[in-house]
Each structure stands twice: as structure tokens, then as C-alpha cells.
């Protein structure tokens, strides 16, 4: 009996919903009505309800499973950093201990003169790079000293770099420099010669 | 070299620019050549010479040896270069899109001081050179590598 009345109530509500939907179709022809009637009334299809449940369940799963994973990744990162040897990066800097020989301009220019048998370079000190040398020595003040130097440093890629050249020493302080060689340490590993020393 | 045309896995011109030589602005029009130029070298009687320079300059002009060394348009003695000339030999073991494009069985290293060759050695596998020039892996690359072990 109760079931029968419930069926009646169900049918009445169904007929009323259908009536509202049909009425709305005529009064609002632009709206997509047929399959969206339930949504319009606040209801949801079975598929939509399952989709919502699935999304909620997955969201909760990712939240509960994801946060510990992120915390774990940060922990591993800190652990790896702690185990890493300290970075040995250093900057190019000429120290007193890098100075090799005190030399005059004439000594350097004799030593660094380029003489190519095929005449493929100017027969001048530092050959193709003579202009830079002339600009460098133009900075010299009376009383300045020129020293040859060789310095090693490590770049951001942990590559050992060897730089050689000549530097101005003014009142005991290291000033501007002129590079004669700059290269990765591994590629210079077998080079024995030093700047300012006859080759 | 010895009458043969070989590949070179180093850039001796970079040292010229590092030591104060004027570097023209090259147009980078190919991702296979980020330098923007191709240089030709000749190792003649133990001396290293730059014999060619090809590329496009920013603005559209053609790069040439005469542009860098106007008085030496055919051959310039590379007295500025000190280091190792790296010549790949044997089969390519691995190909990748960085550095010089791969790893070879071995490489011939010619030691050069101020443009003059002073000896050579053969090194098995070129990977150590490549690895030395690559930036260190980031933390997530190391983490993935560790997770994959």
C-alpha cells in the first residue's frame, strides 16, 4: 500500500518535472533542456554522481599519498646535499704566491715576440694580440713593476682553469693583468712551460 | 692533418677571444651549431694555423678569416692557443645532442703550447672530456638516478 502511494508520489513528481521541463523548453527555447532537466532542478545523473565520487576519492588519495612523497623528496634532497662534497668553486684572482718573475717590458717583448716561418702572424710581441699588449703597458705608471704569473681556479662546472700572463704590481699591490694563456686545466695538464720563462 | 681532413673537438678560437681578440657577432641560425661559425685548421710542420672561417654575421654579412685577421686572409698562426687539440677516432659509441654530438672509441690529443705542437697521446673514450664540460646534474636528476638504481 505504502509502496503504491510512493509510486504515485514518484509519478506525480515525475509528471511535474516533465511538465516544468516542457514548459521551460517553450519559454526558454535557447536552453538545452531534455537531458539537463535533472541538473536544472539540482539533481545529478548516476554517471555524474559516480564521477564526483571518483574525483573526490582520487583527490583524497593524492593528498594523503602525495604529501608524504613530497616530504620524502625534500628529505632525500637534503640527505644528498649533506653527502655531497663541498663545492670547490673559486674565482679568478691573482695572489702574491702566483707571481713568478719580475720582468722589464723589453724582456717580455723579446720573449713573447712571434716569428712564424710562414709569416702568418705579425712579427711583434704577442703577434695578433699585440694591440691588447700595447694598451696594457700604456697603463703603467712610473714605479710600477711587471710580473709574470700563473694562477689556477675552478669555474662553476668544477673545471680547473689555468690562467697565465703578466700583471702590474703597484706599491706592492696587484693591479691589472694581461692574459697570455687561459684554458681548462685538463687540457693544459701536460704543459710544462711558464710565463716569463724562455720556451 | 697529415694530408687528412679530421674533426676537431675543441674551439681554439675561443682562447683568442678570451685573451683579448675581437669577437664578431655571429648569427646563430642552426641549433646544431650554437657557436655560429665553422673554423678550419691546419697543423703544418707542428704549427697550428687557422685557415678558414665560415658563418653568418648578425646583420647578414658573411664571416671570413679576413674579417678576423685583415692582413692574413688565408692563414693565421694560432700562437694564442695552448691546450689539447682533441681529434675523435674510431667508431661513434653514443650519439647525443650536446657538446660535439657524441662519444667516440678514442681520441687523439695533441698537446699545443702557444700554437706549437709538443707531443700527442691517445685516450680511450671521449666521454670524460664531454662530462667535464657539462654542468652538474640537478637534485631531481640525481634523485631520479638514485630511485632508478
Image (tube, coloured by chain):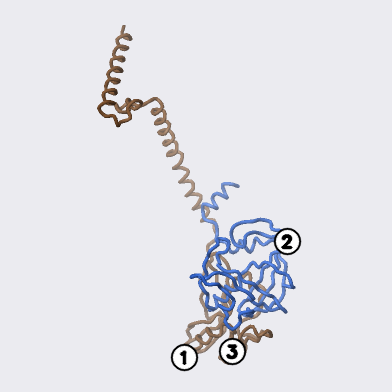
Chain colours: A brown, B blue
Q: Position of residue A166 (x, y in %)?
A: 55, 83
Binning the other alpha carbons within 10 Å of mark 1 as few (below 14), some (14 to 19) or many (20 upward) gives few
Q: Name which residue lies at 30% across and 31% down.
A: A31
Say if B53 sits above or below B30 in the image: below
Mark carried by residue A21 = none
Q: Is residue A169 above or below residue A69?
A: below
For the C terminus of chain A, which image quadrant?
bottom right
Q: Chain of mark 2?
A: B
Q: Which mark is residue A109?
A: 3
Find residue B68 and report its image quarter: bottom right
Question: Which residue is denoted by mark 1 in the rendering?
Answer: A141
**Residue that numbered label 2 is attached to:** B90
Q: Earlier in the sequence, mark 1 or mark 3?
A: 3
Which chain is home to disc 3? Answer: A
In depth, the one of A13 and B109 nearer the eye is A13
Instruction: State whether residue B139 is above or below residue A184.
Output: above
CA–CA distance in space, label 2 to label 3: 43 Å
Q: Is residue A11 left or right of residue A82?
A: left
Amino acid at each position: 500500500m505504502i509502496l503504491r502511494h510512493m509510486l504515485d508520489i514518484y509519478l506525480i513528481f515525475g509528471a511535474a518535472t516533465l511538465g516544468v521541463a516542457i514548459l521551460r523548453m517553450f519559454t526558454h527555447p535557447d536552453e538545452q533542456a531534455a537531458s539537463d532537466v535533472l541538473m536544472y532542478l539540482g539533481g545529478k545523473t548516476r554517471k555524474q554522481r559516480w564521477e564526483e565520487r571518483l574525483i573526490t576519492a582520487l583527490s583524497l588519495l593524492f593528498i594523503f599519498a602525495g604529501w608524504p612523497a613530497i616530504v620524502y623528496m625534500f628529505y632525500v634532497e637534503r640527505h644528498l646535499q649533506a653527502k655531497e662534497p663541498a663545492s670547490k668553486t673559486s674565482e679568478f684572482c691573482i695572489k702574491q704566491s702566483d707571481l713568478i718573475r719580475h720582468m722589464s717590458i723589453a724582456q717580455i717583448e723579446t720573449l713573447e715576440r712571434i716569428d712564424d716561418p710562414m709569416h702568418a702572424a705579425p712579427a711583434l710581441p704577442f703577434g695578433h694580440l699585440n694591440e691588447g699588449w700595447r694598451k696594457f703597458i700604456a697603463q703603467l705608471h712610473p714605479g710600477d713593476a711587471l710580473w709574470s704569473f700563473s694562477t689556477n681556479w675552478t669555474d662553476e662546472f668544477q673545471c680547473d682553469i689555468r690562467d697565465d700572463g703578466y700583471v702590474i704590481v703597484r706599491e706592492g699591490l696587484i693591479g691589472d693583468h694581461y692574459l697570455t694563456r687561459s684554458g681548462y686545466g685538463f687540457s693544459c695538464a701536460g704543459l710544462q712551460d711558464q710565463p716569463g720563462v724562455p720556451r | 692533418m697529415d694530408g687528412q681532413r679530421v674533426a676537431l673537438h675543441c674551439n681554439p678560437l675561443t682562447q683568442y677571444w678570451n685573451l683579448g681578440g675581437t669577437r664578431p657577432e655571429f648569427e646563430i641560425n642552426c641549433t646544431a651549431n650554437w657557436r655560429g661559425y665553422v673554423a678550419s685548421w691546419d697543423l703544418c710542420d707542428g704549427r697550428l694555423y687557422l685557415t678558414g672561417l665560415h658563418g653568418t654575421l648578425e646583420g647578414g654579412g658573411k664571416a671570413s678569416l679576413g674579417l678576423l685577421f685583415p692582413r692574413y686572409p688565408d692563414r693565421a698562426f694560432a700562437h694564442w692557443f695552448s691546450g689539447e687539440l682533441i681529434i675523435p677516432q674510431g667508431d661513434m659509441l653514443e650519439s647525443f645532442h650536446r657538446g660535439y654530438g657524441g662519444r667516440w672509441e678514442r681520441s687523439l690529443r695533441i698537446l699545443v703550447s702557444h700554437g706549437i705542437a709538443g707531443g700527442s697521446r691517445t685516450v680511450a673514450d671521449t666521454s670524460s672530456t664531454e662530462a667535464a664540460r657539462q654542468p652538474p646534474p640537478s637534485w631531481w636528476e640525481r634523485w631520479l638516478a638514485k630511485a632508478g638504481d
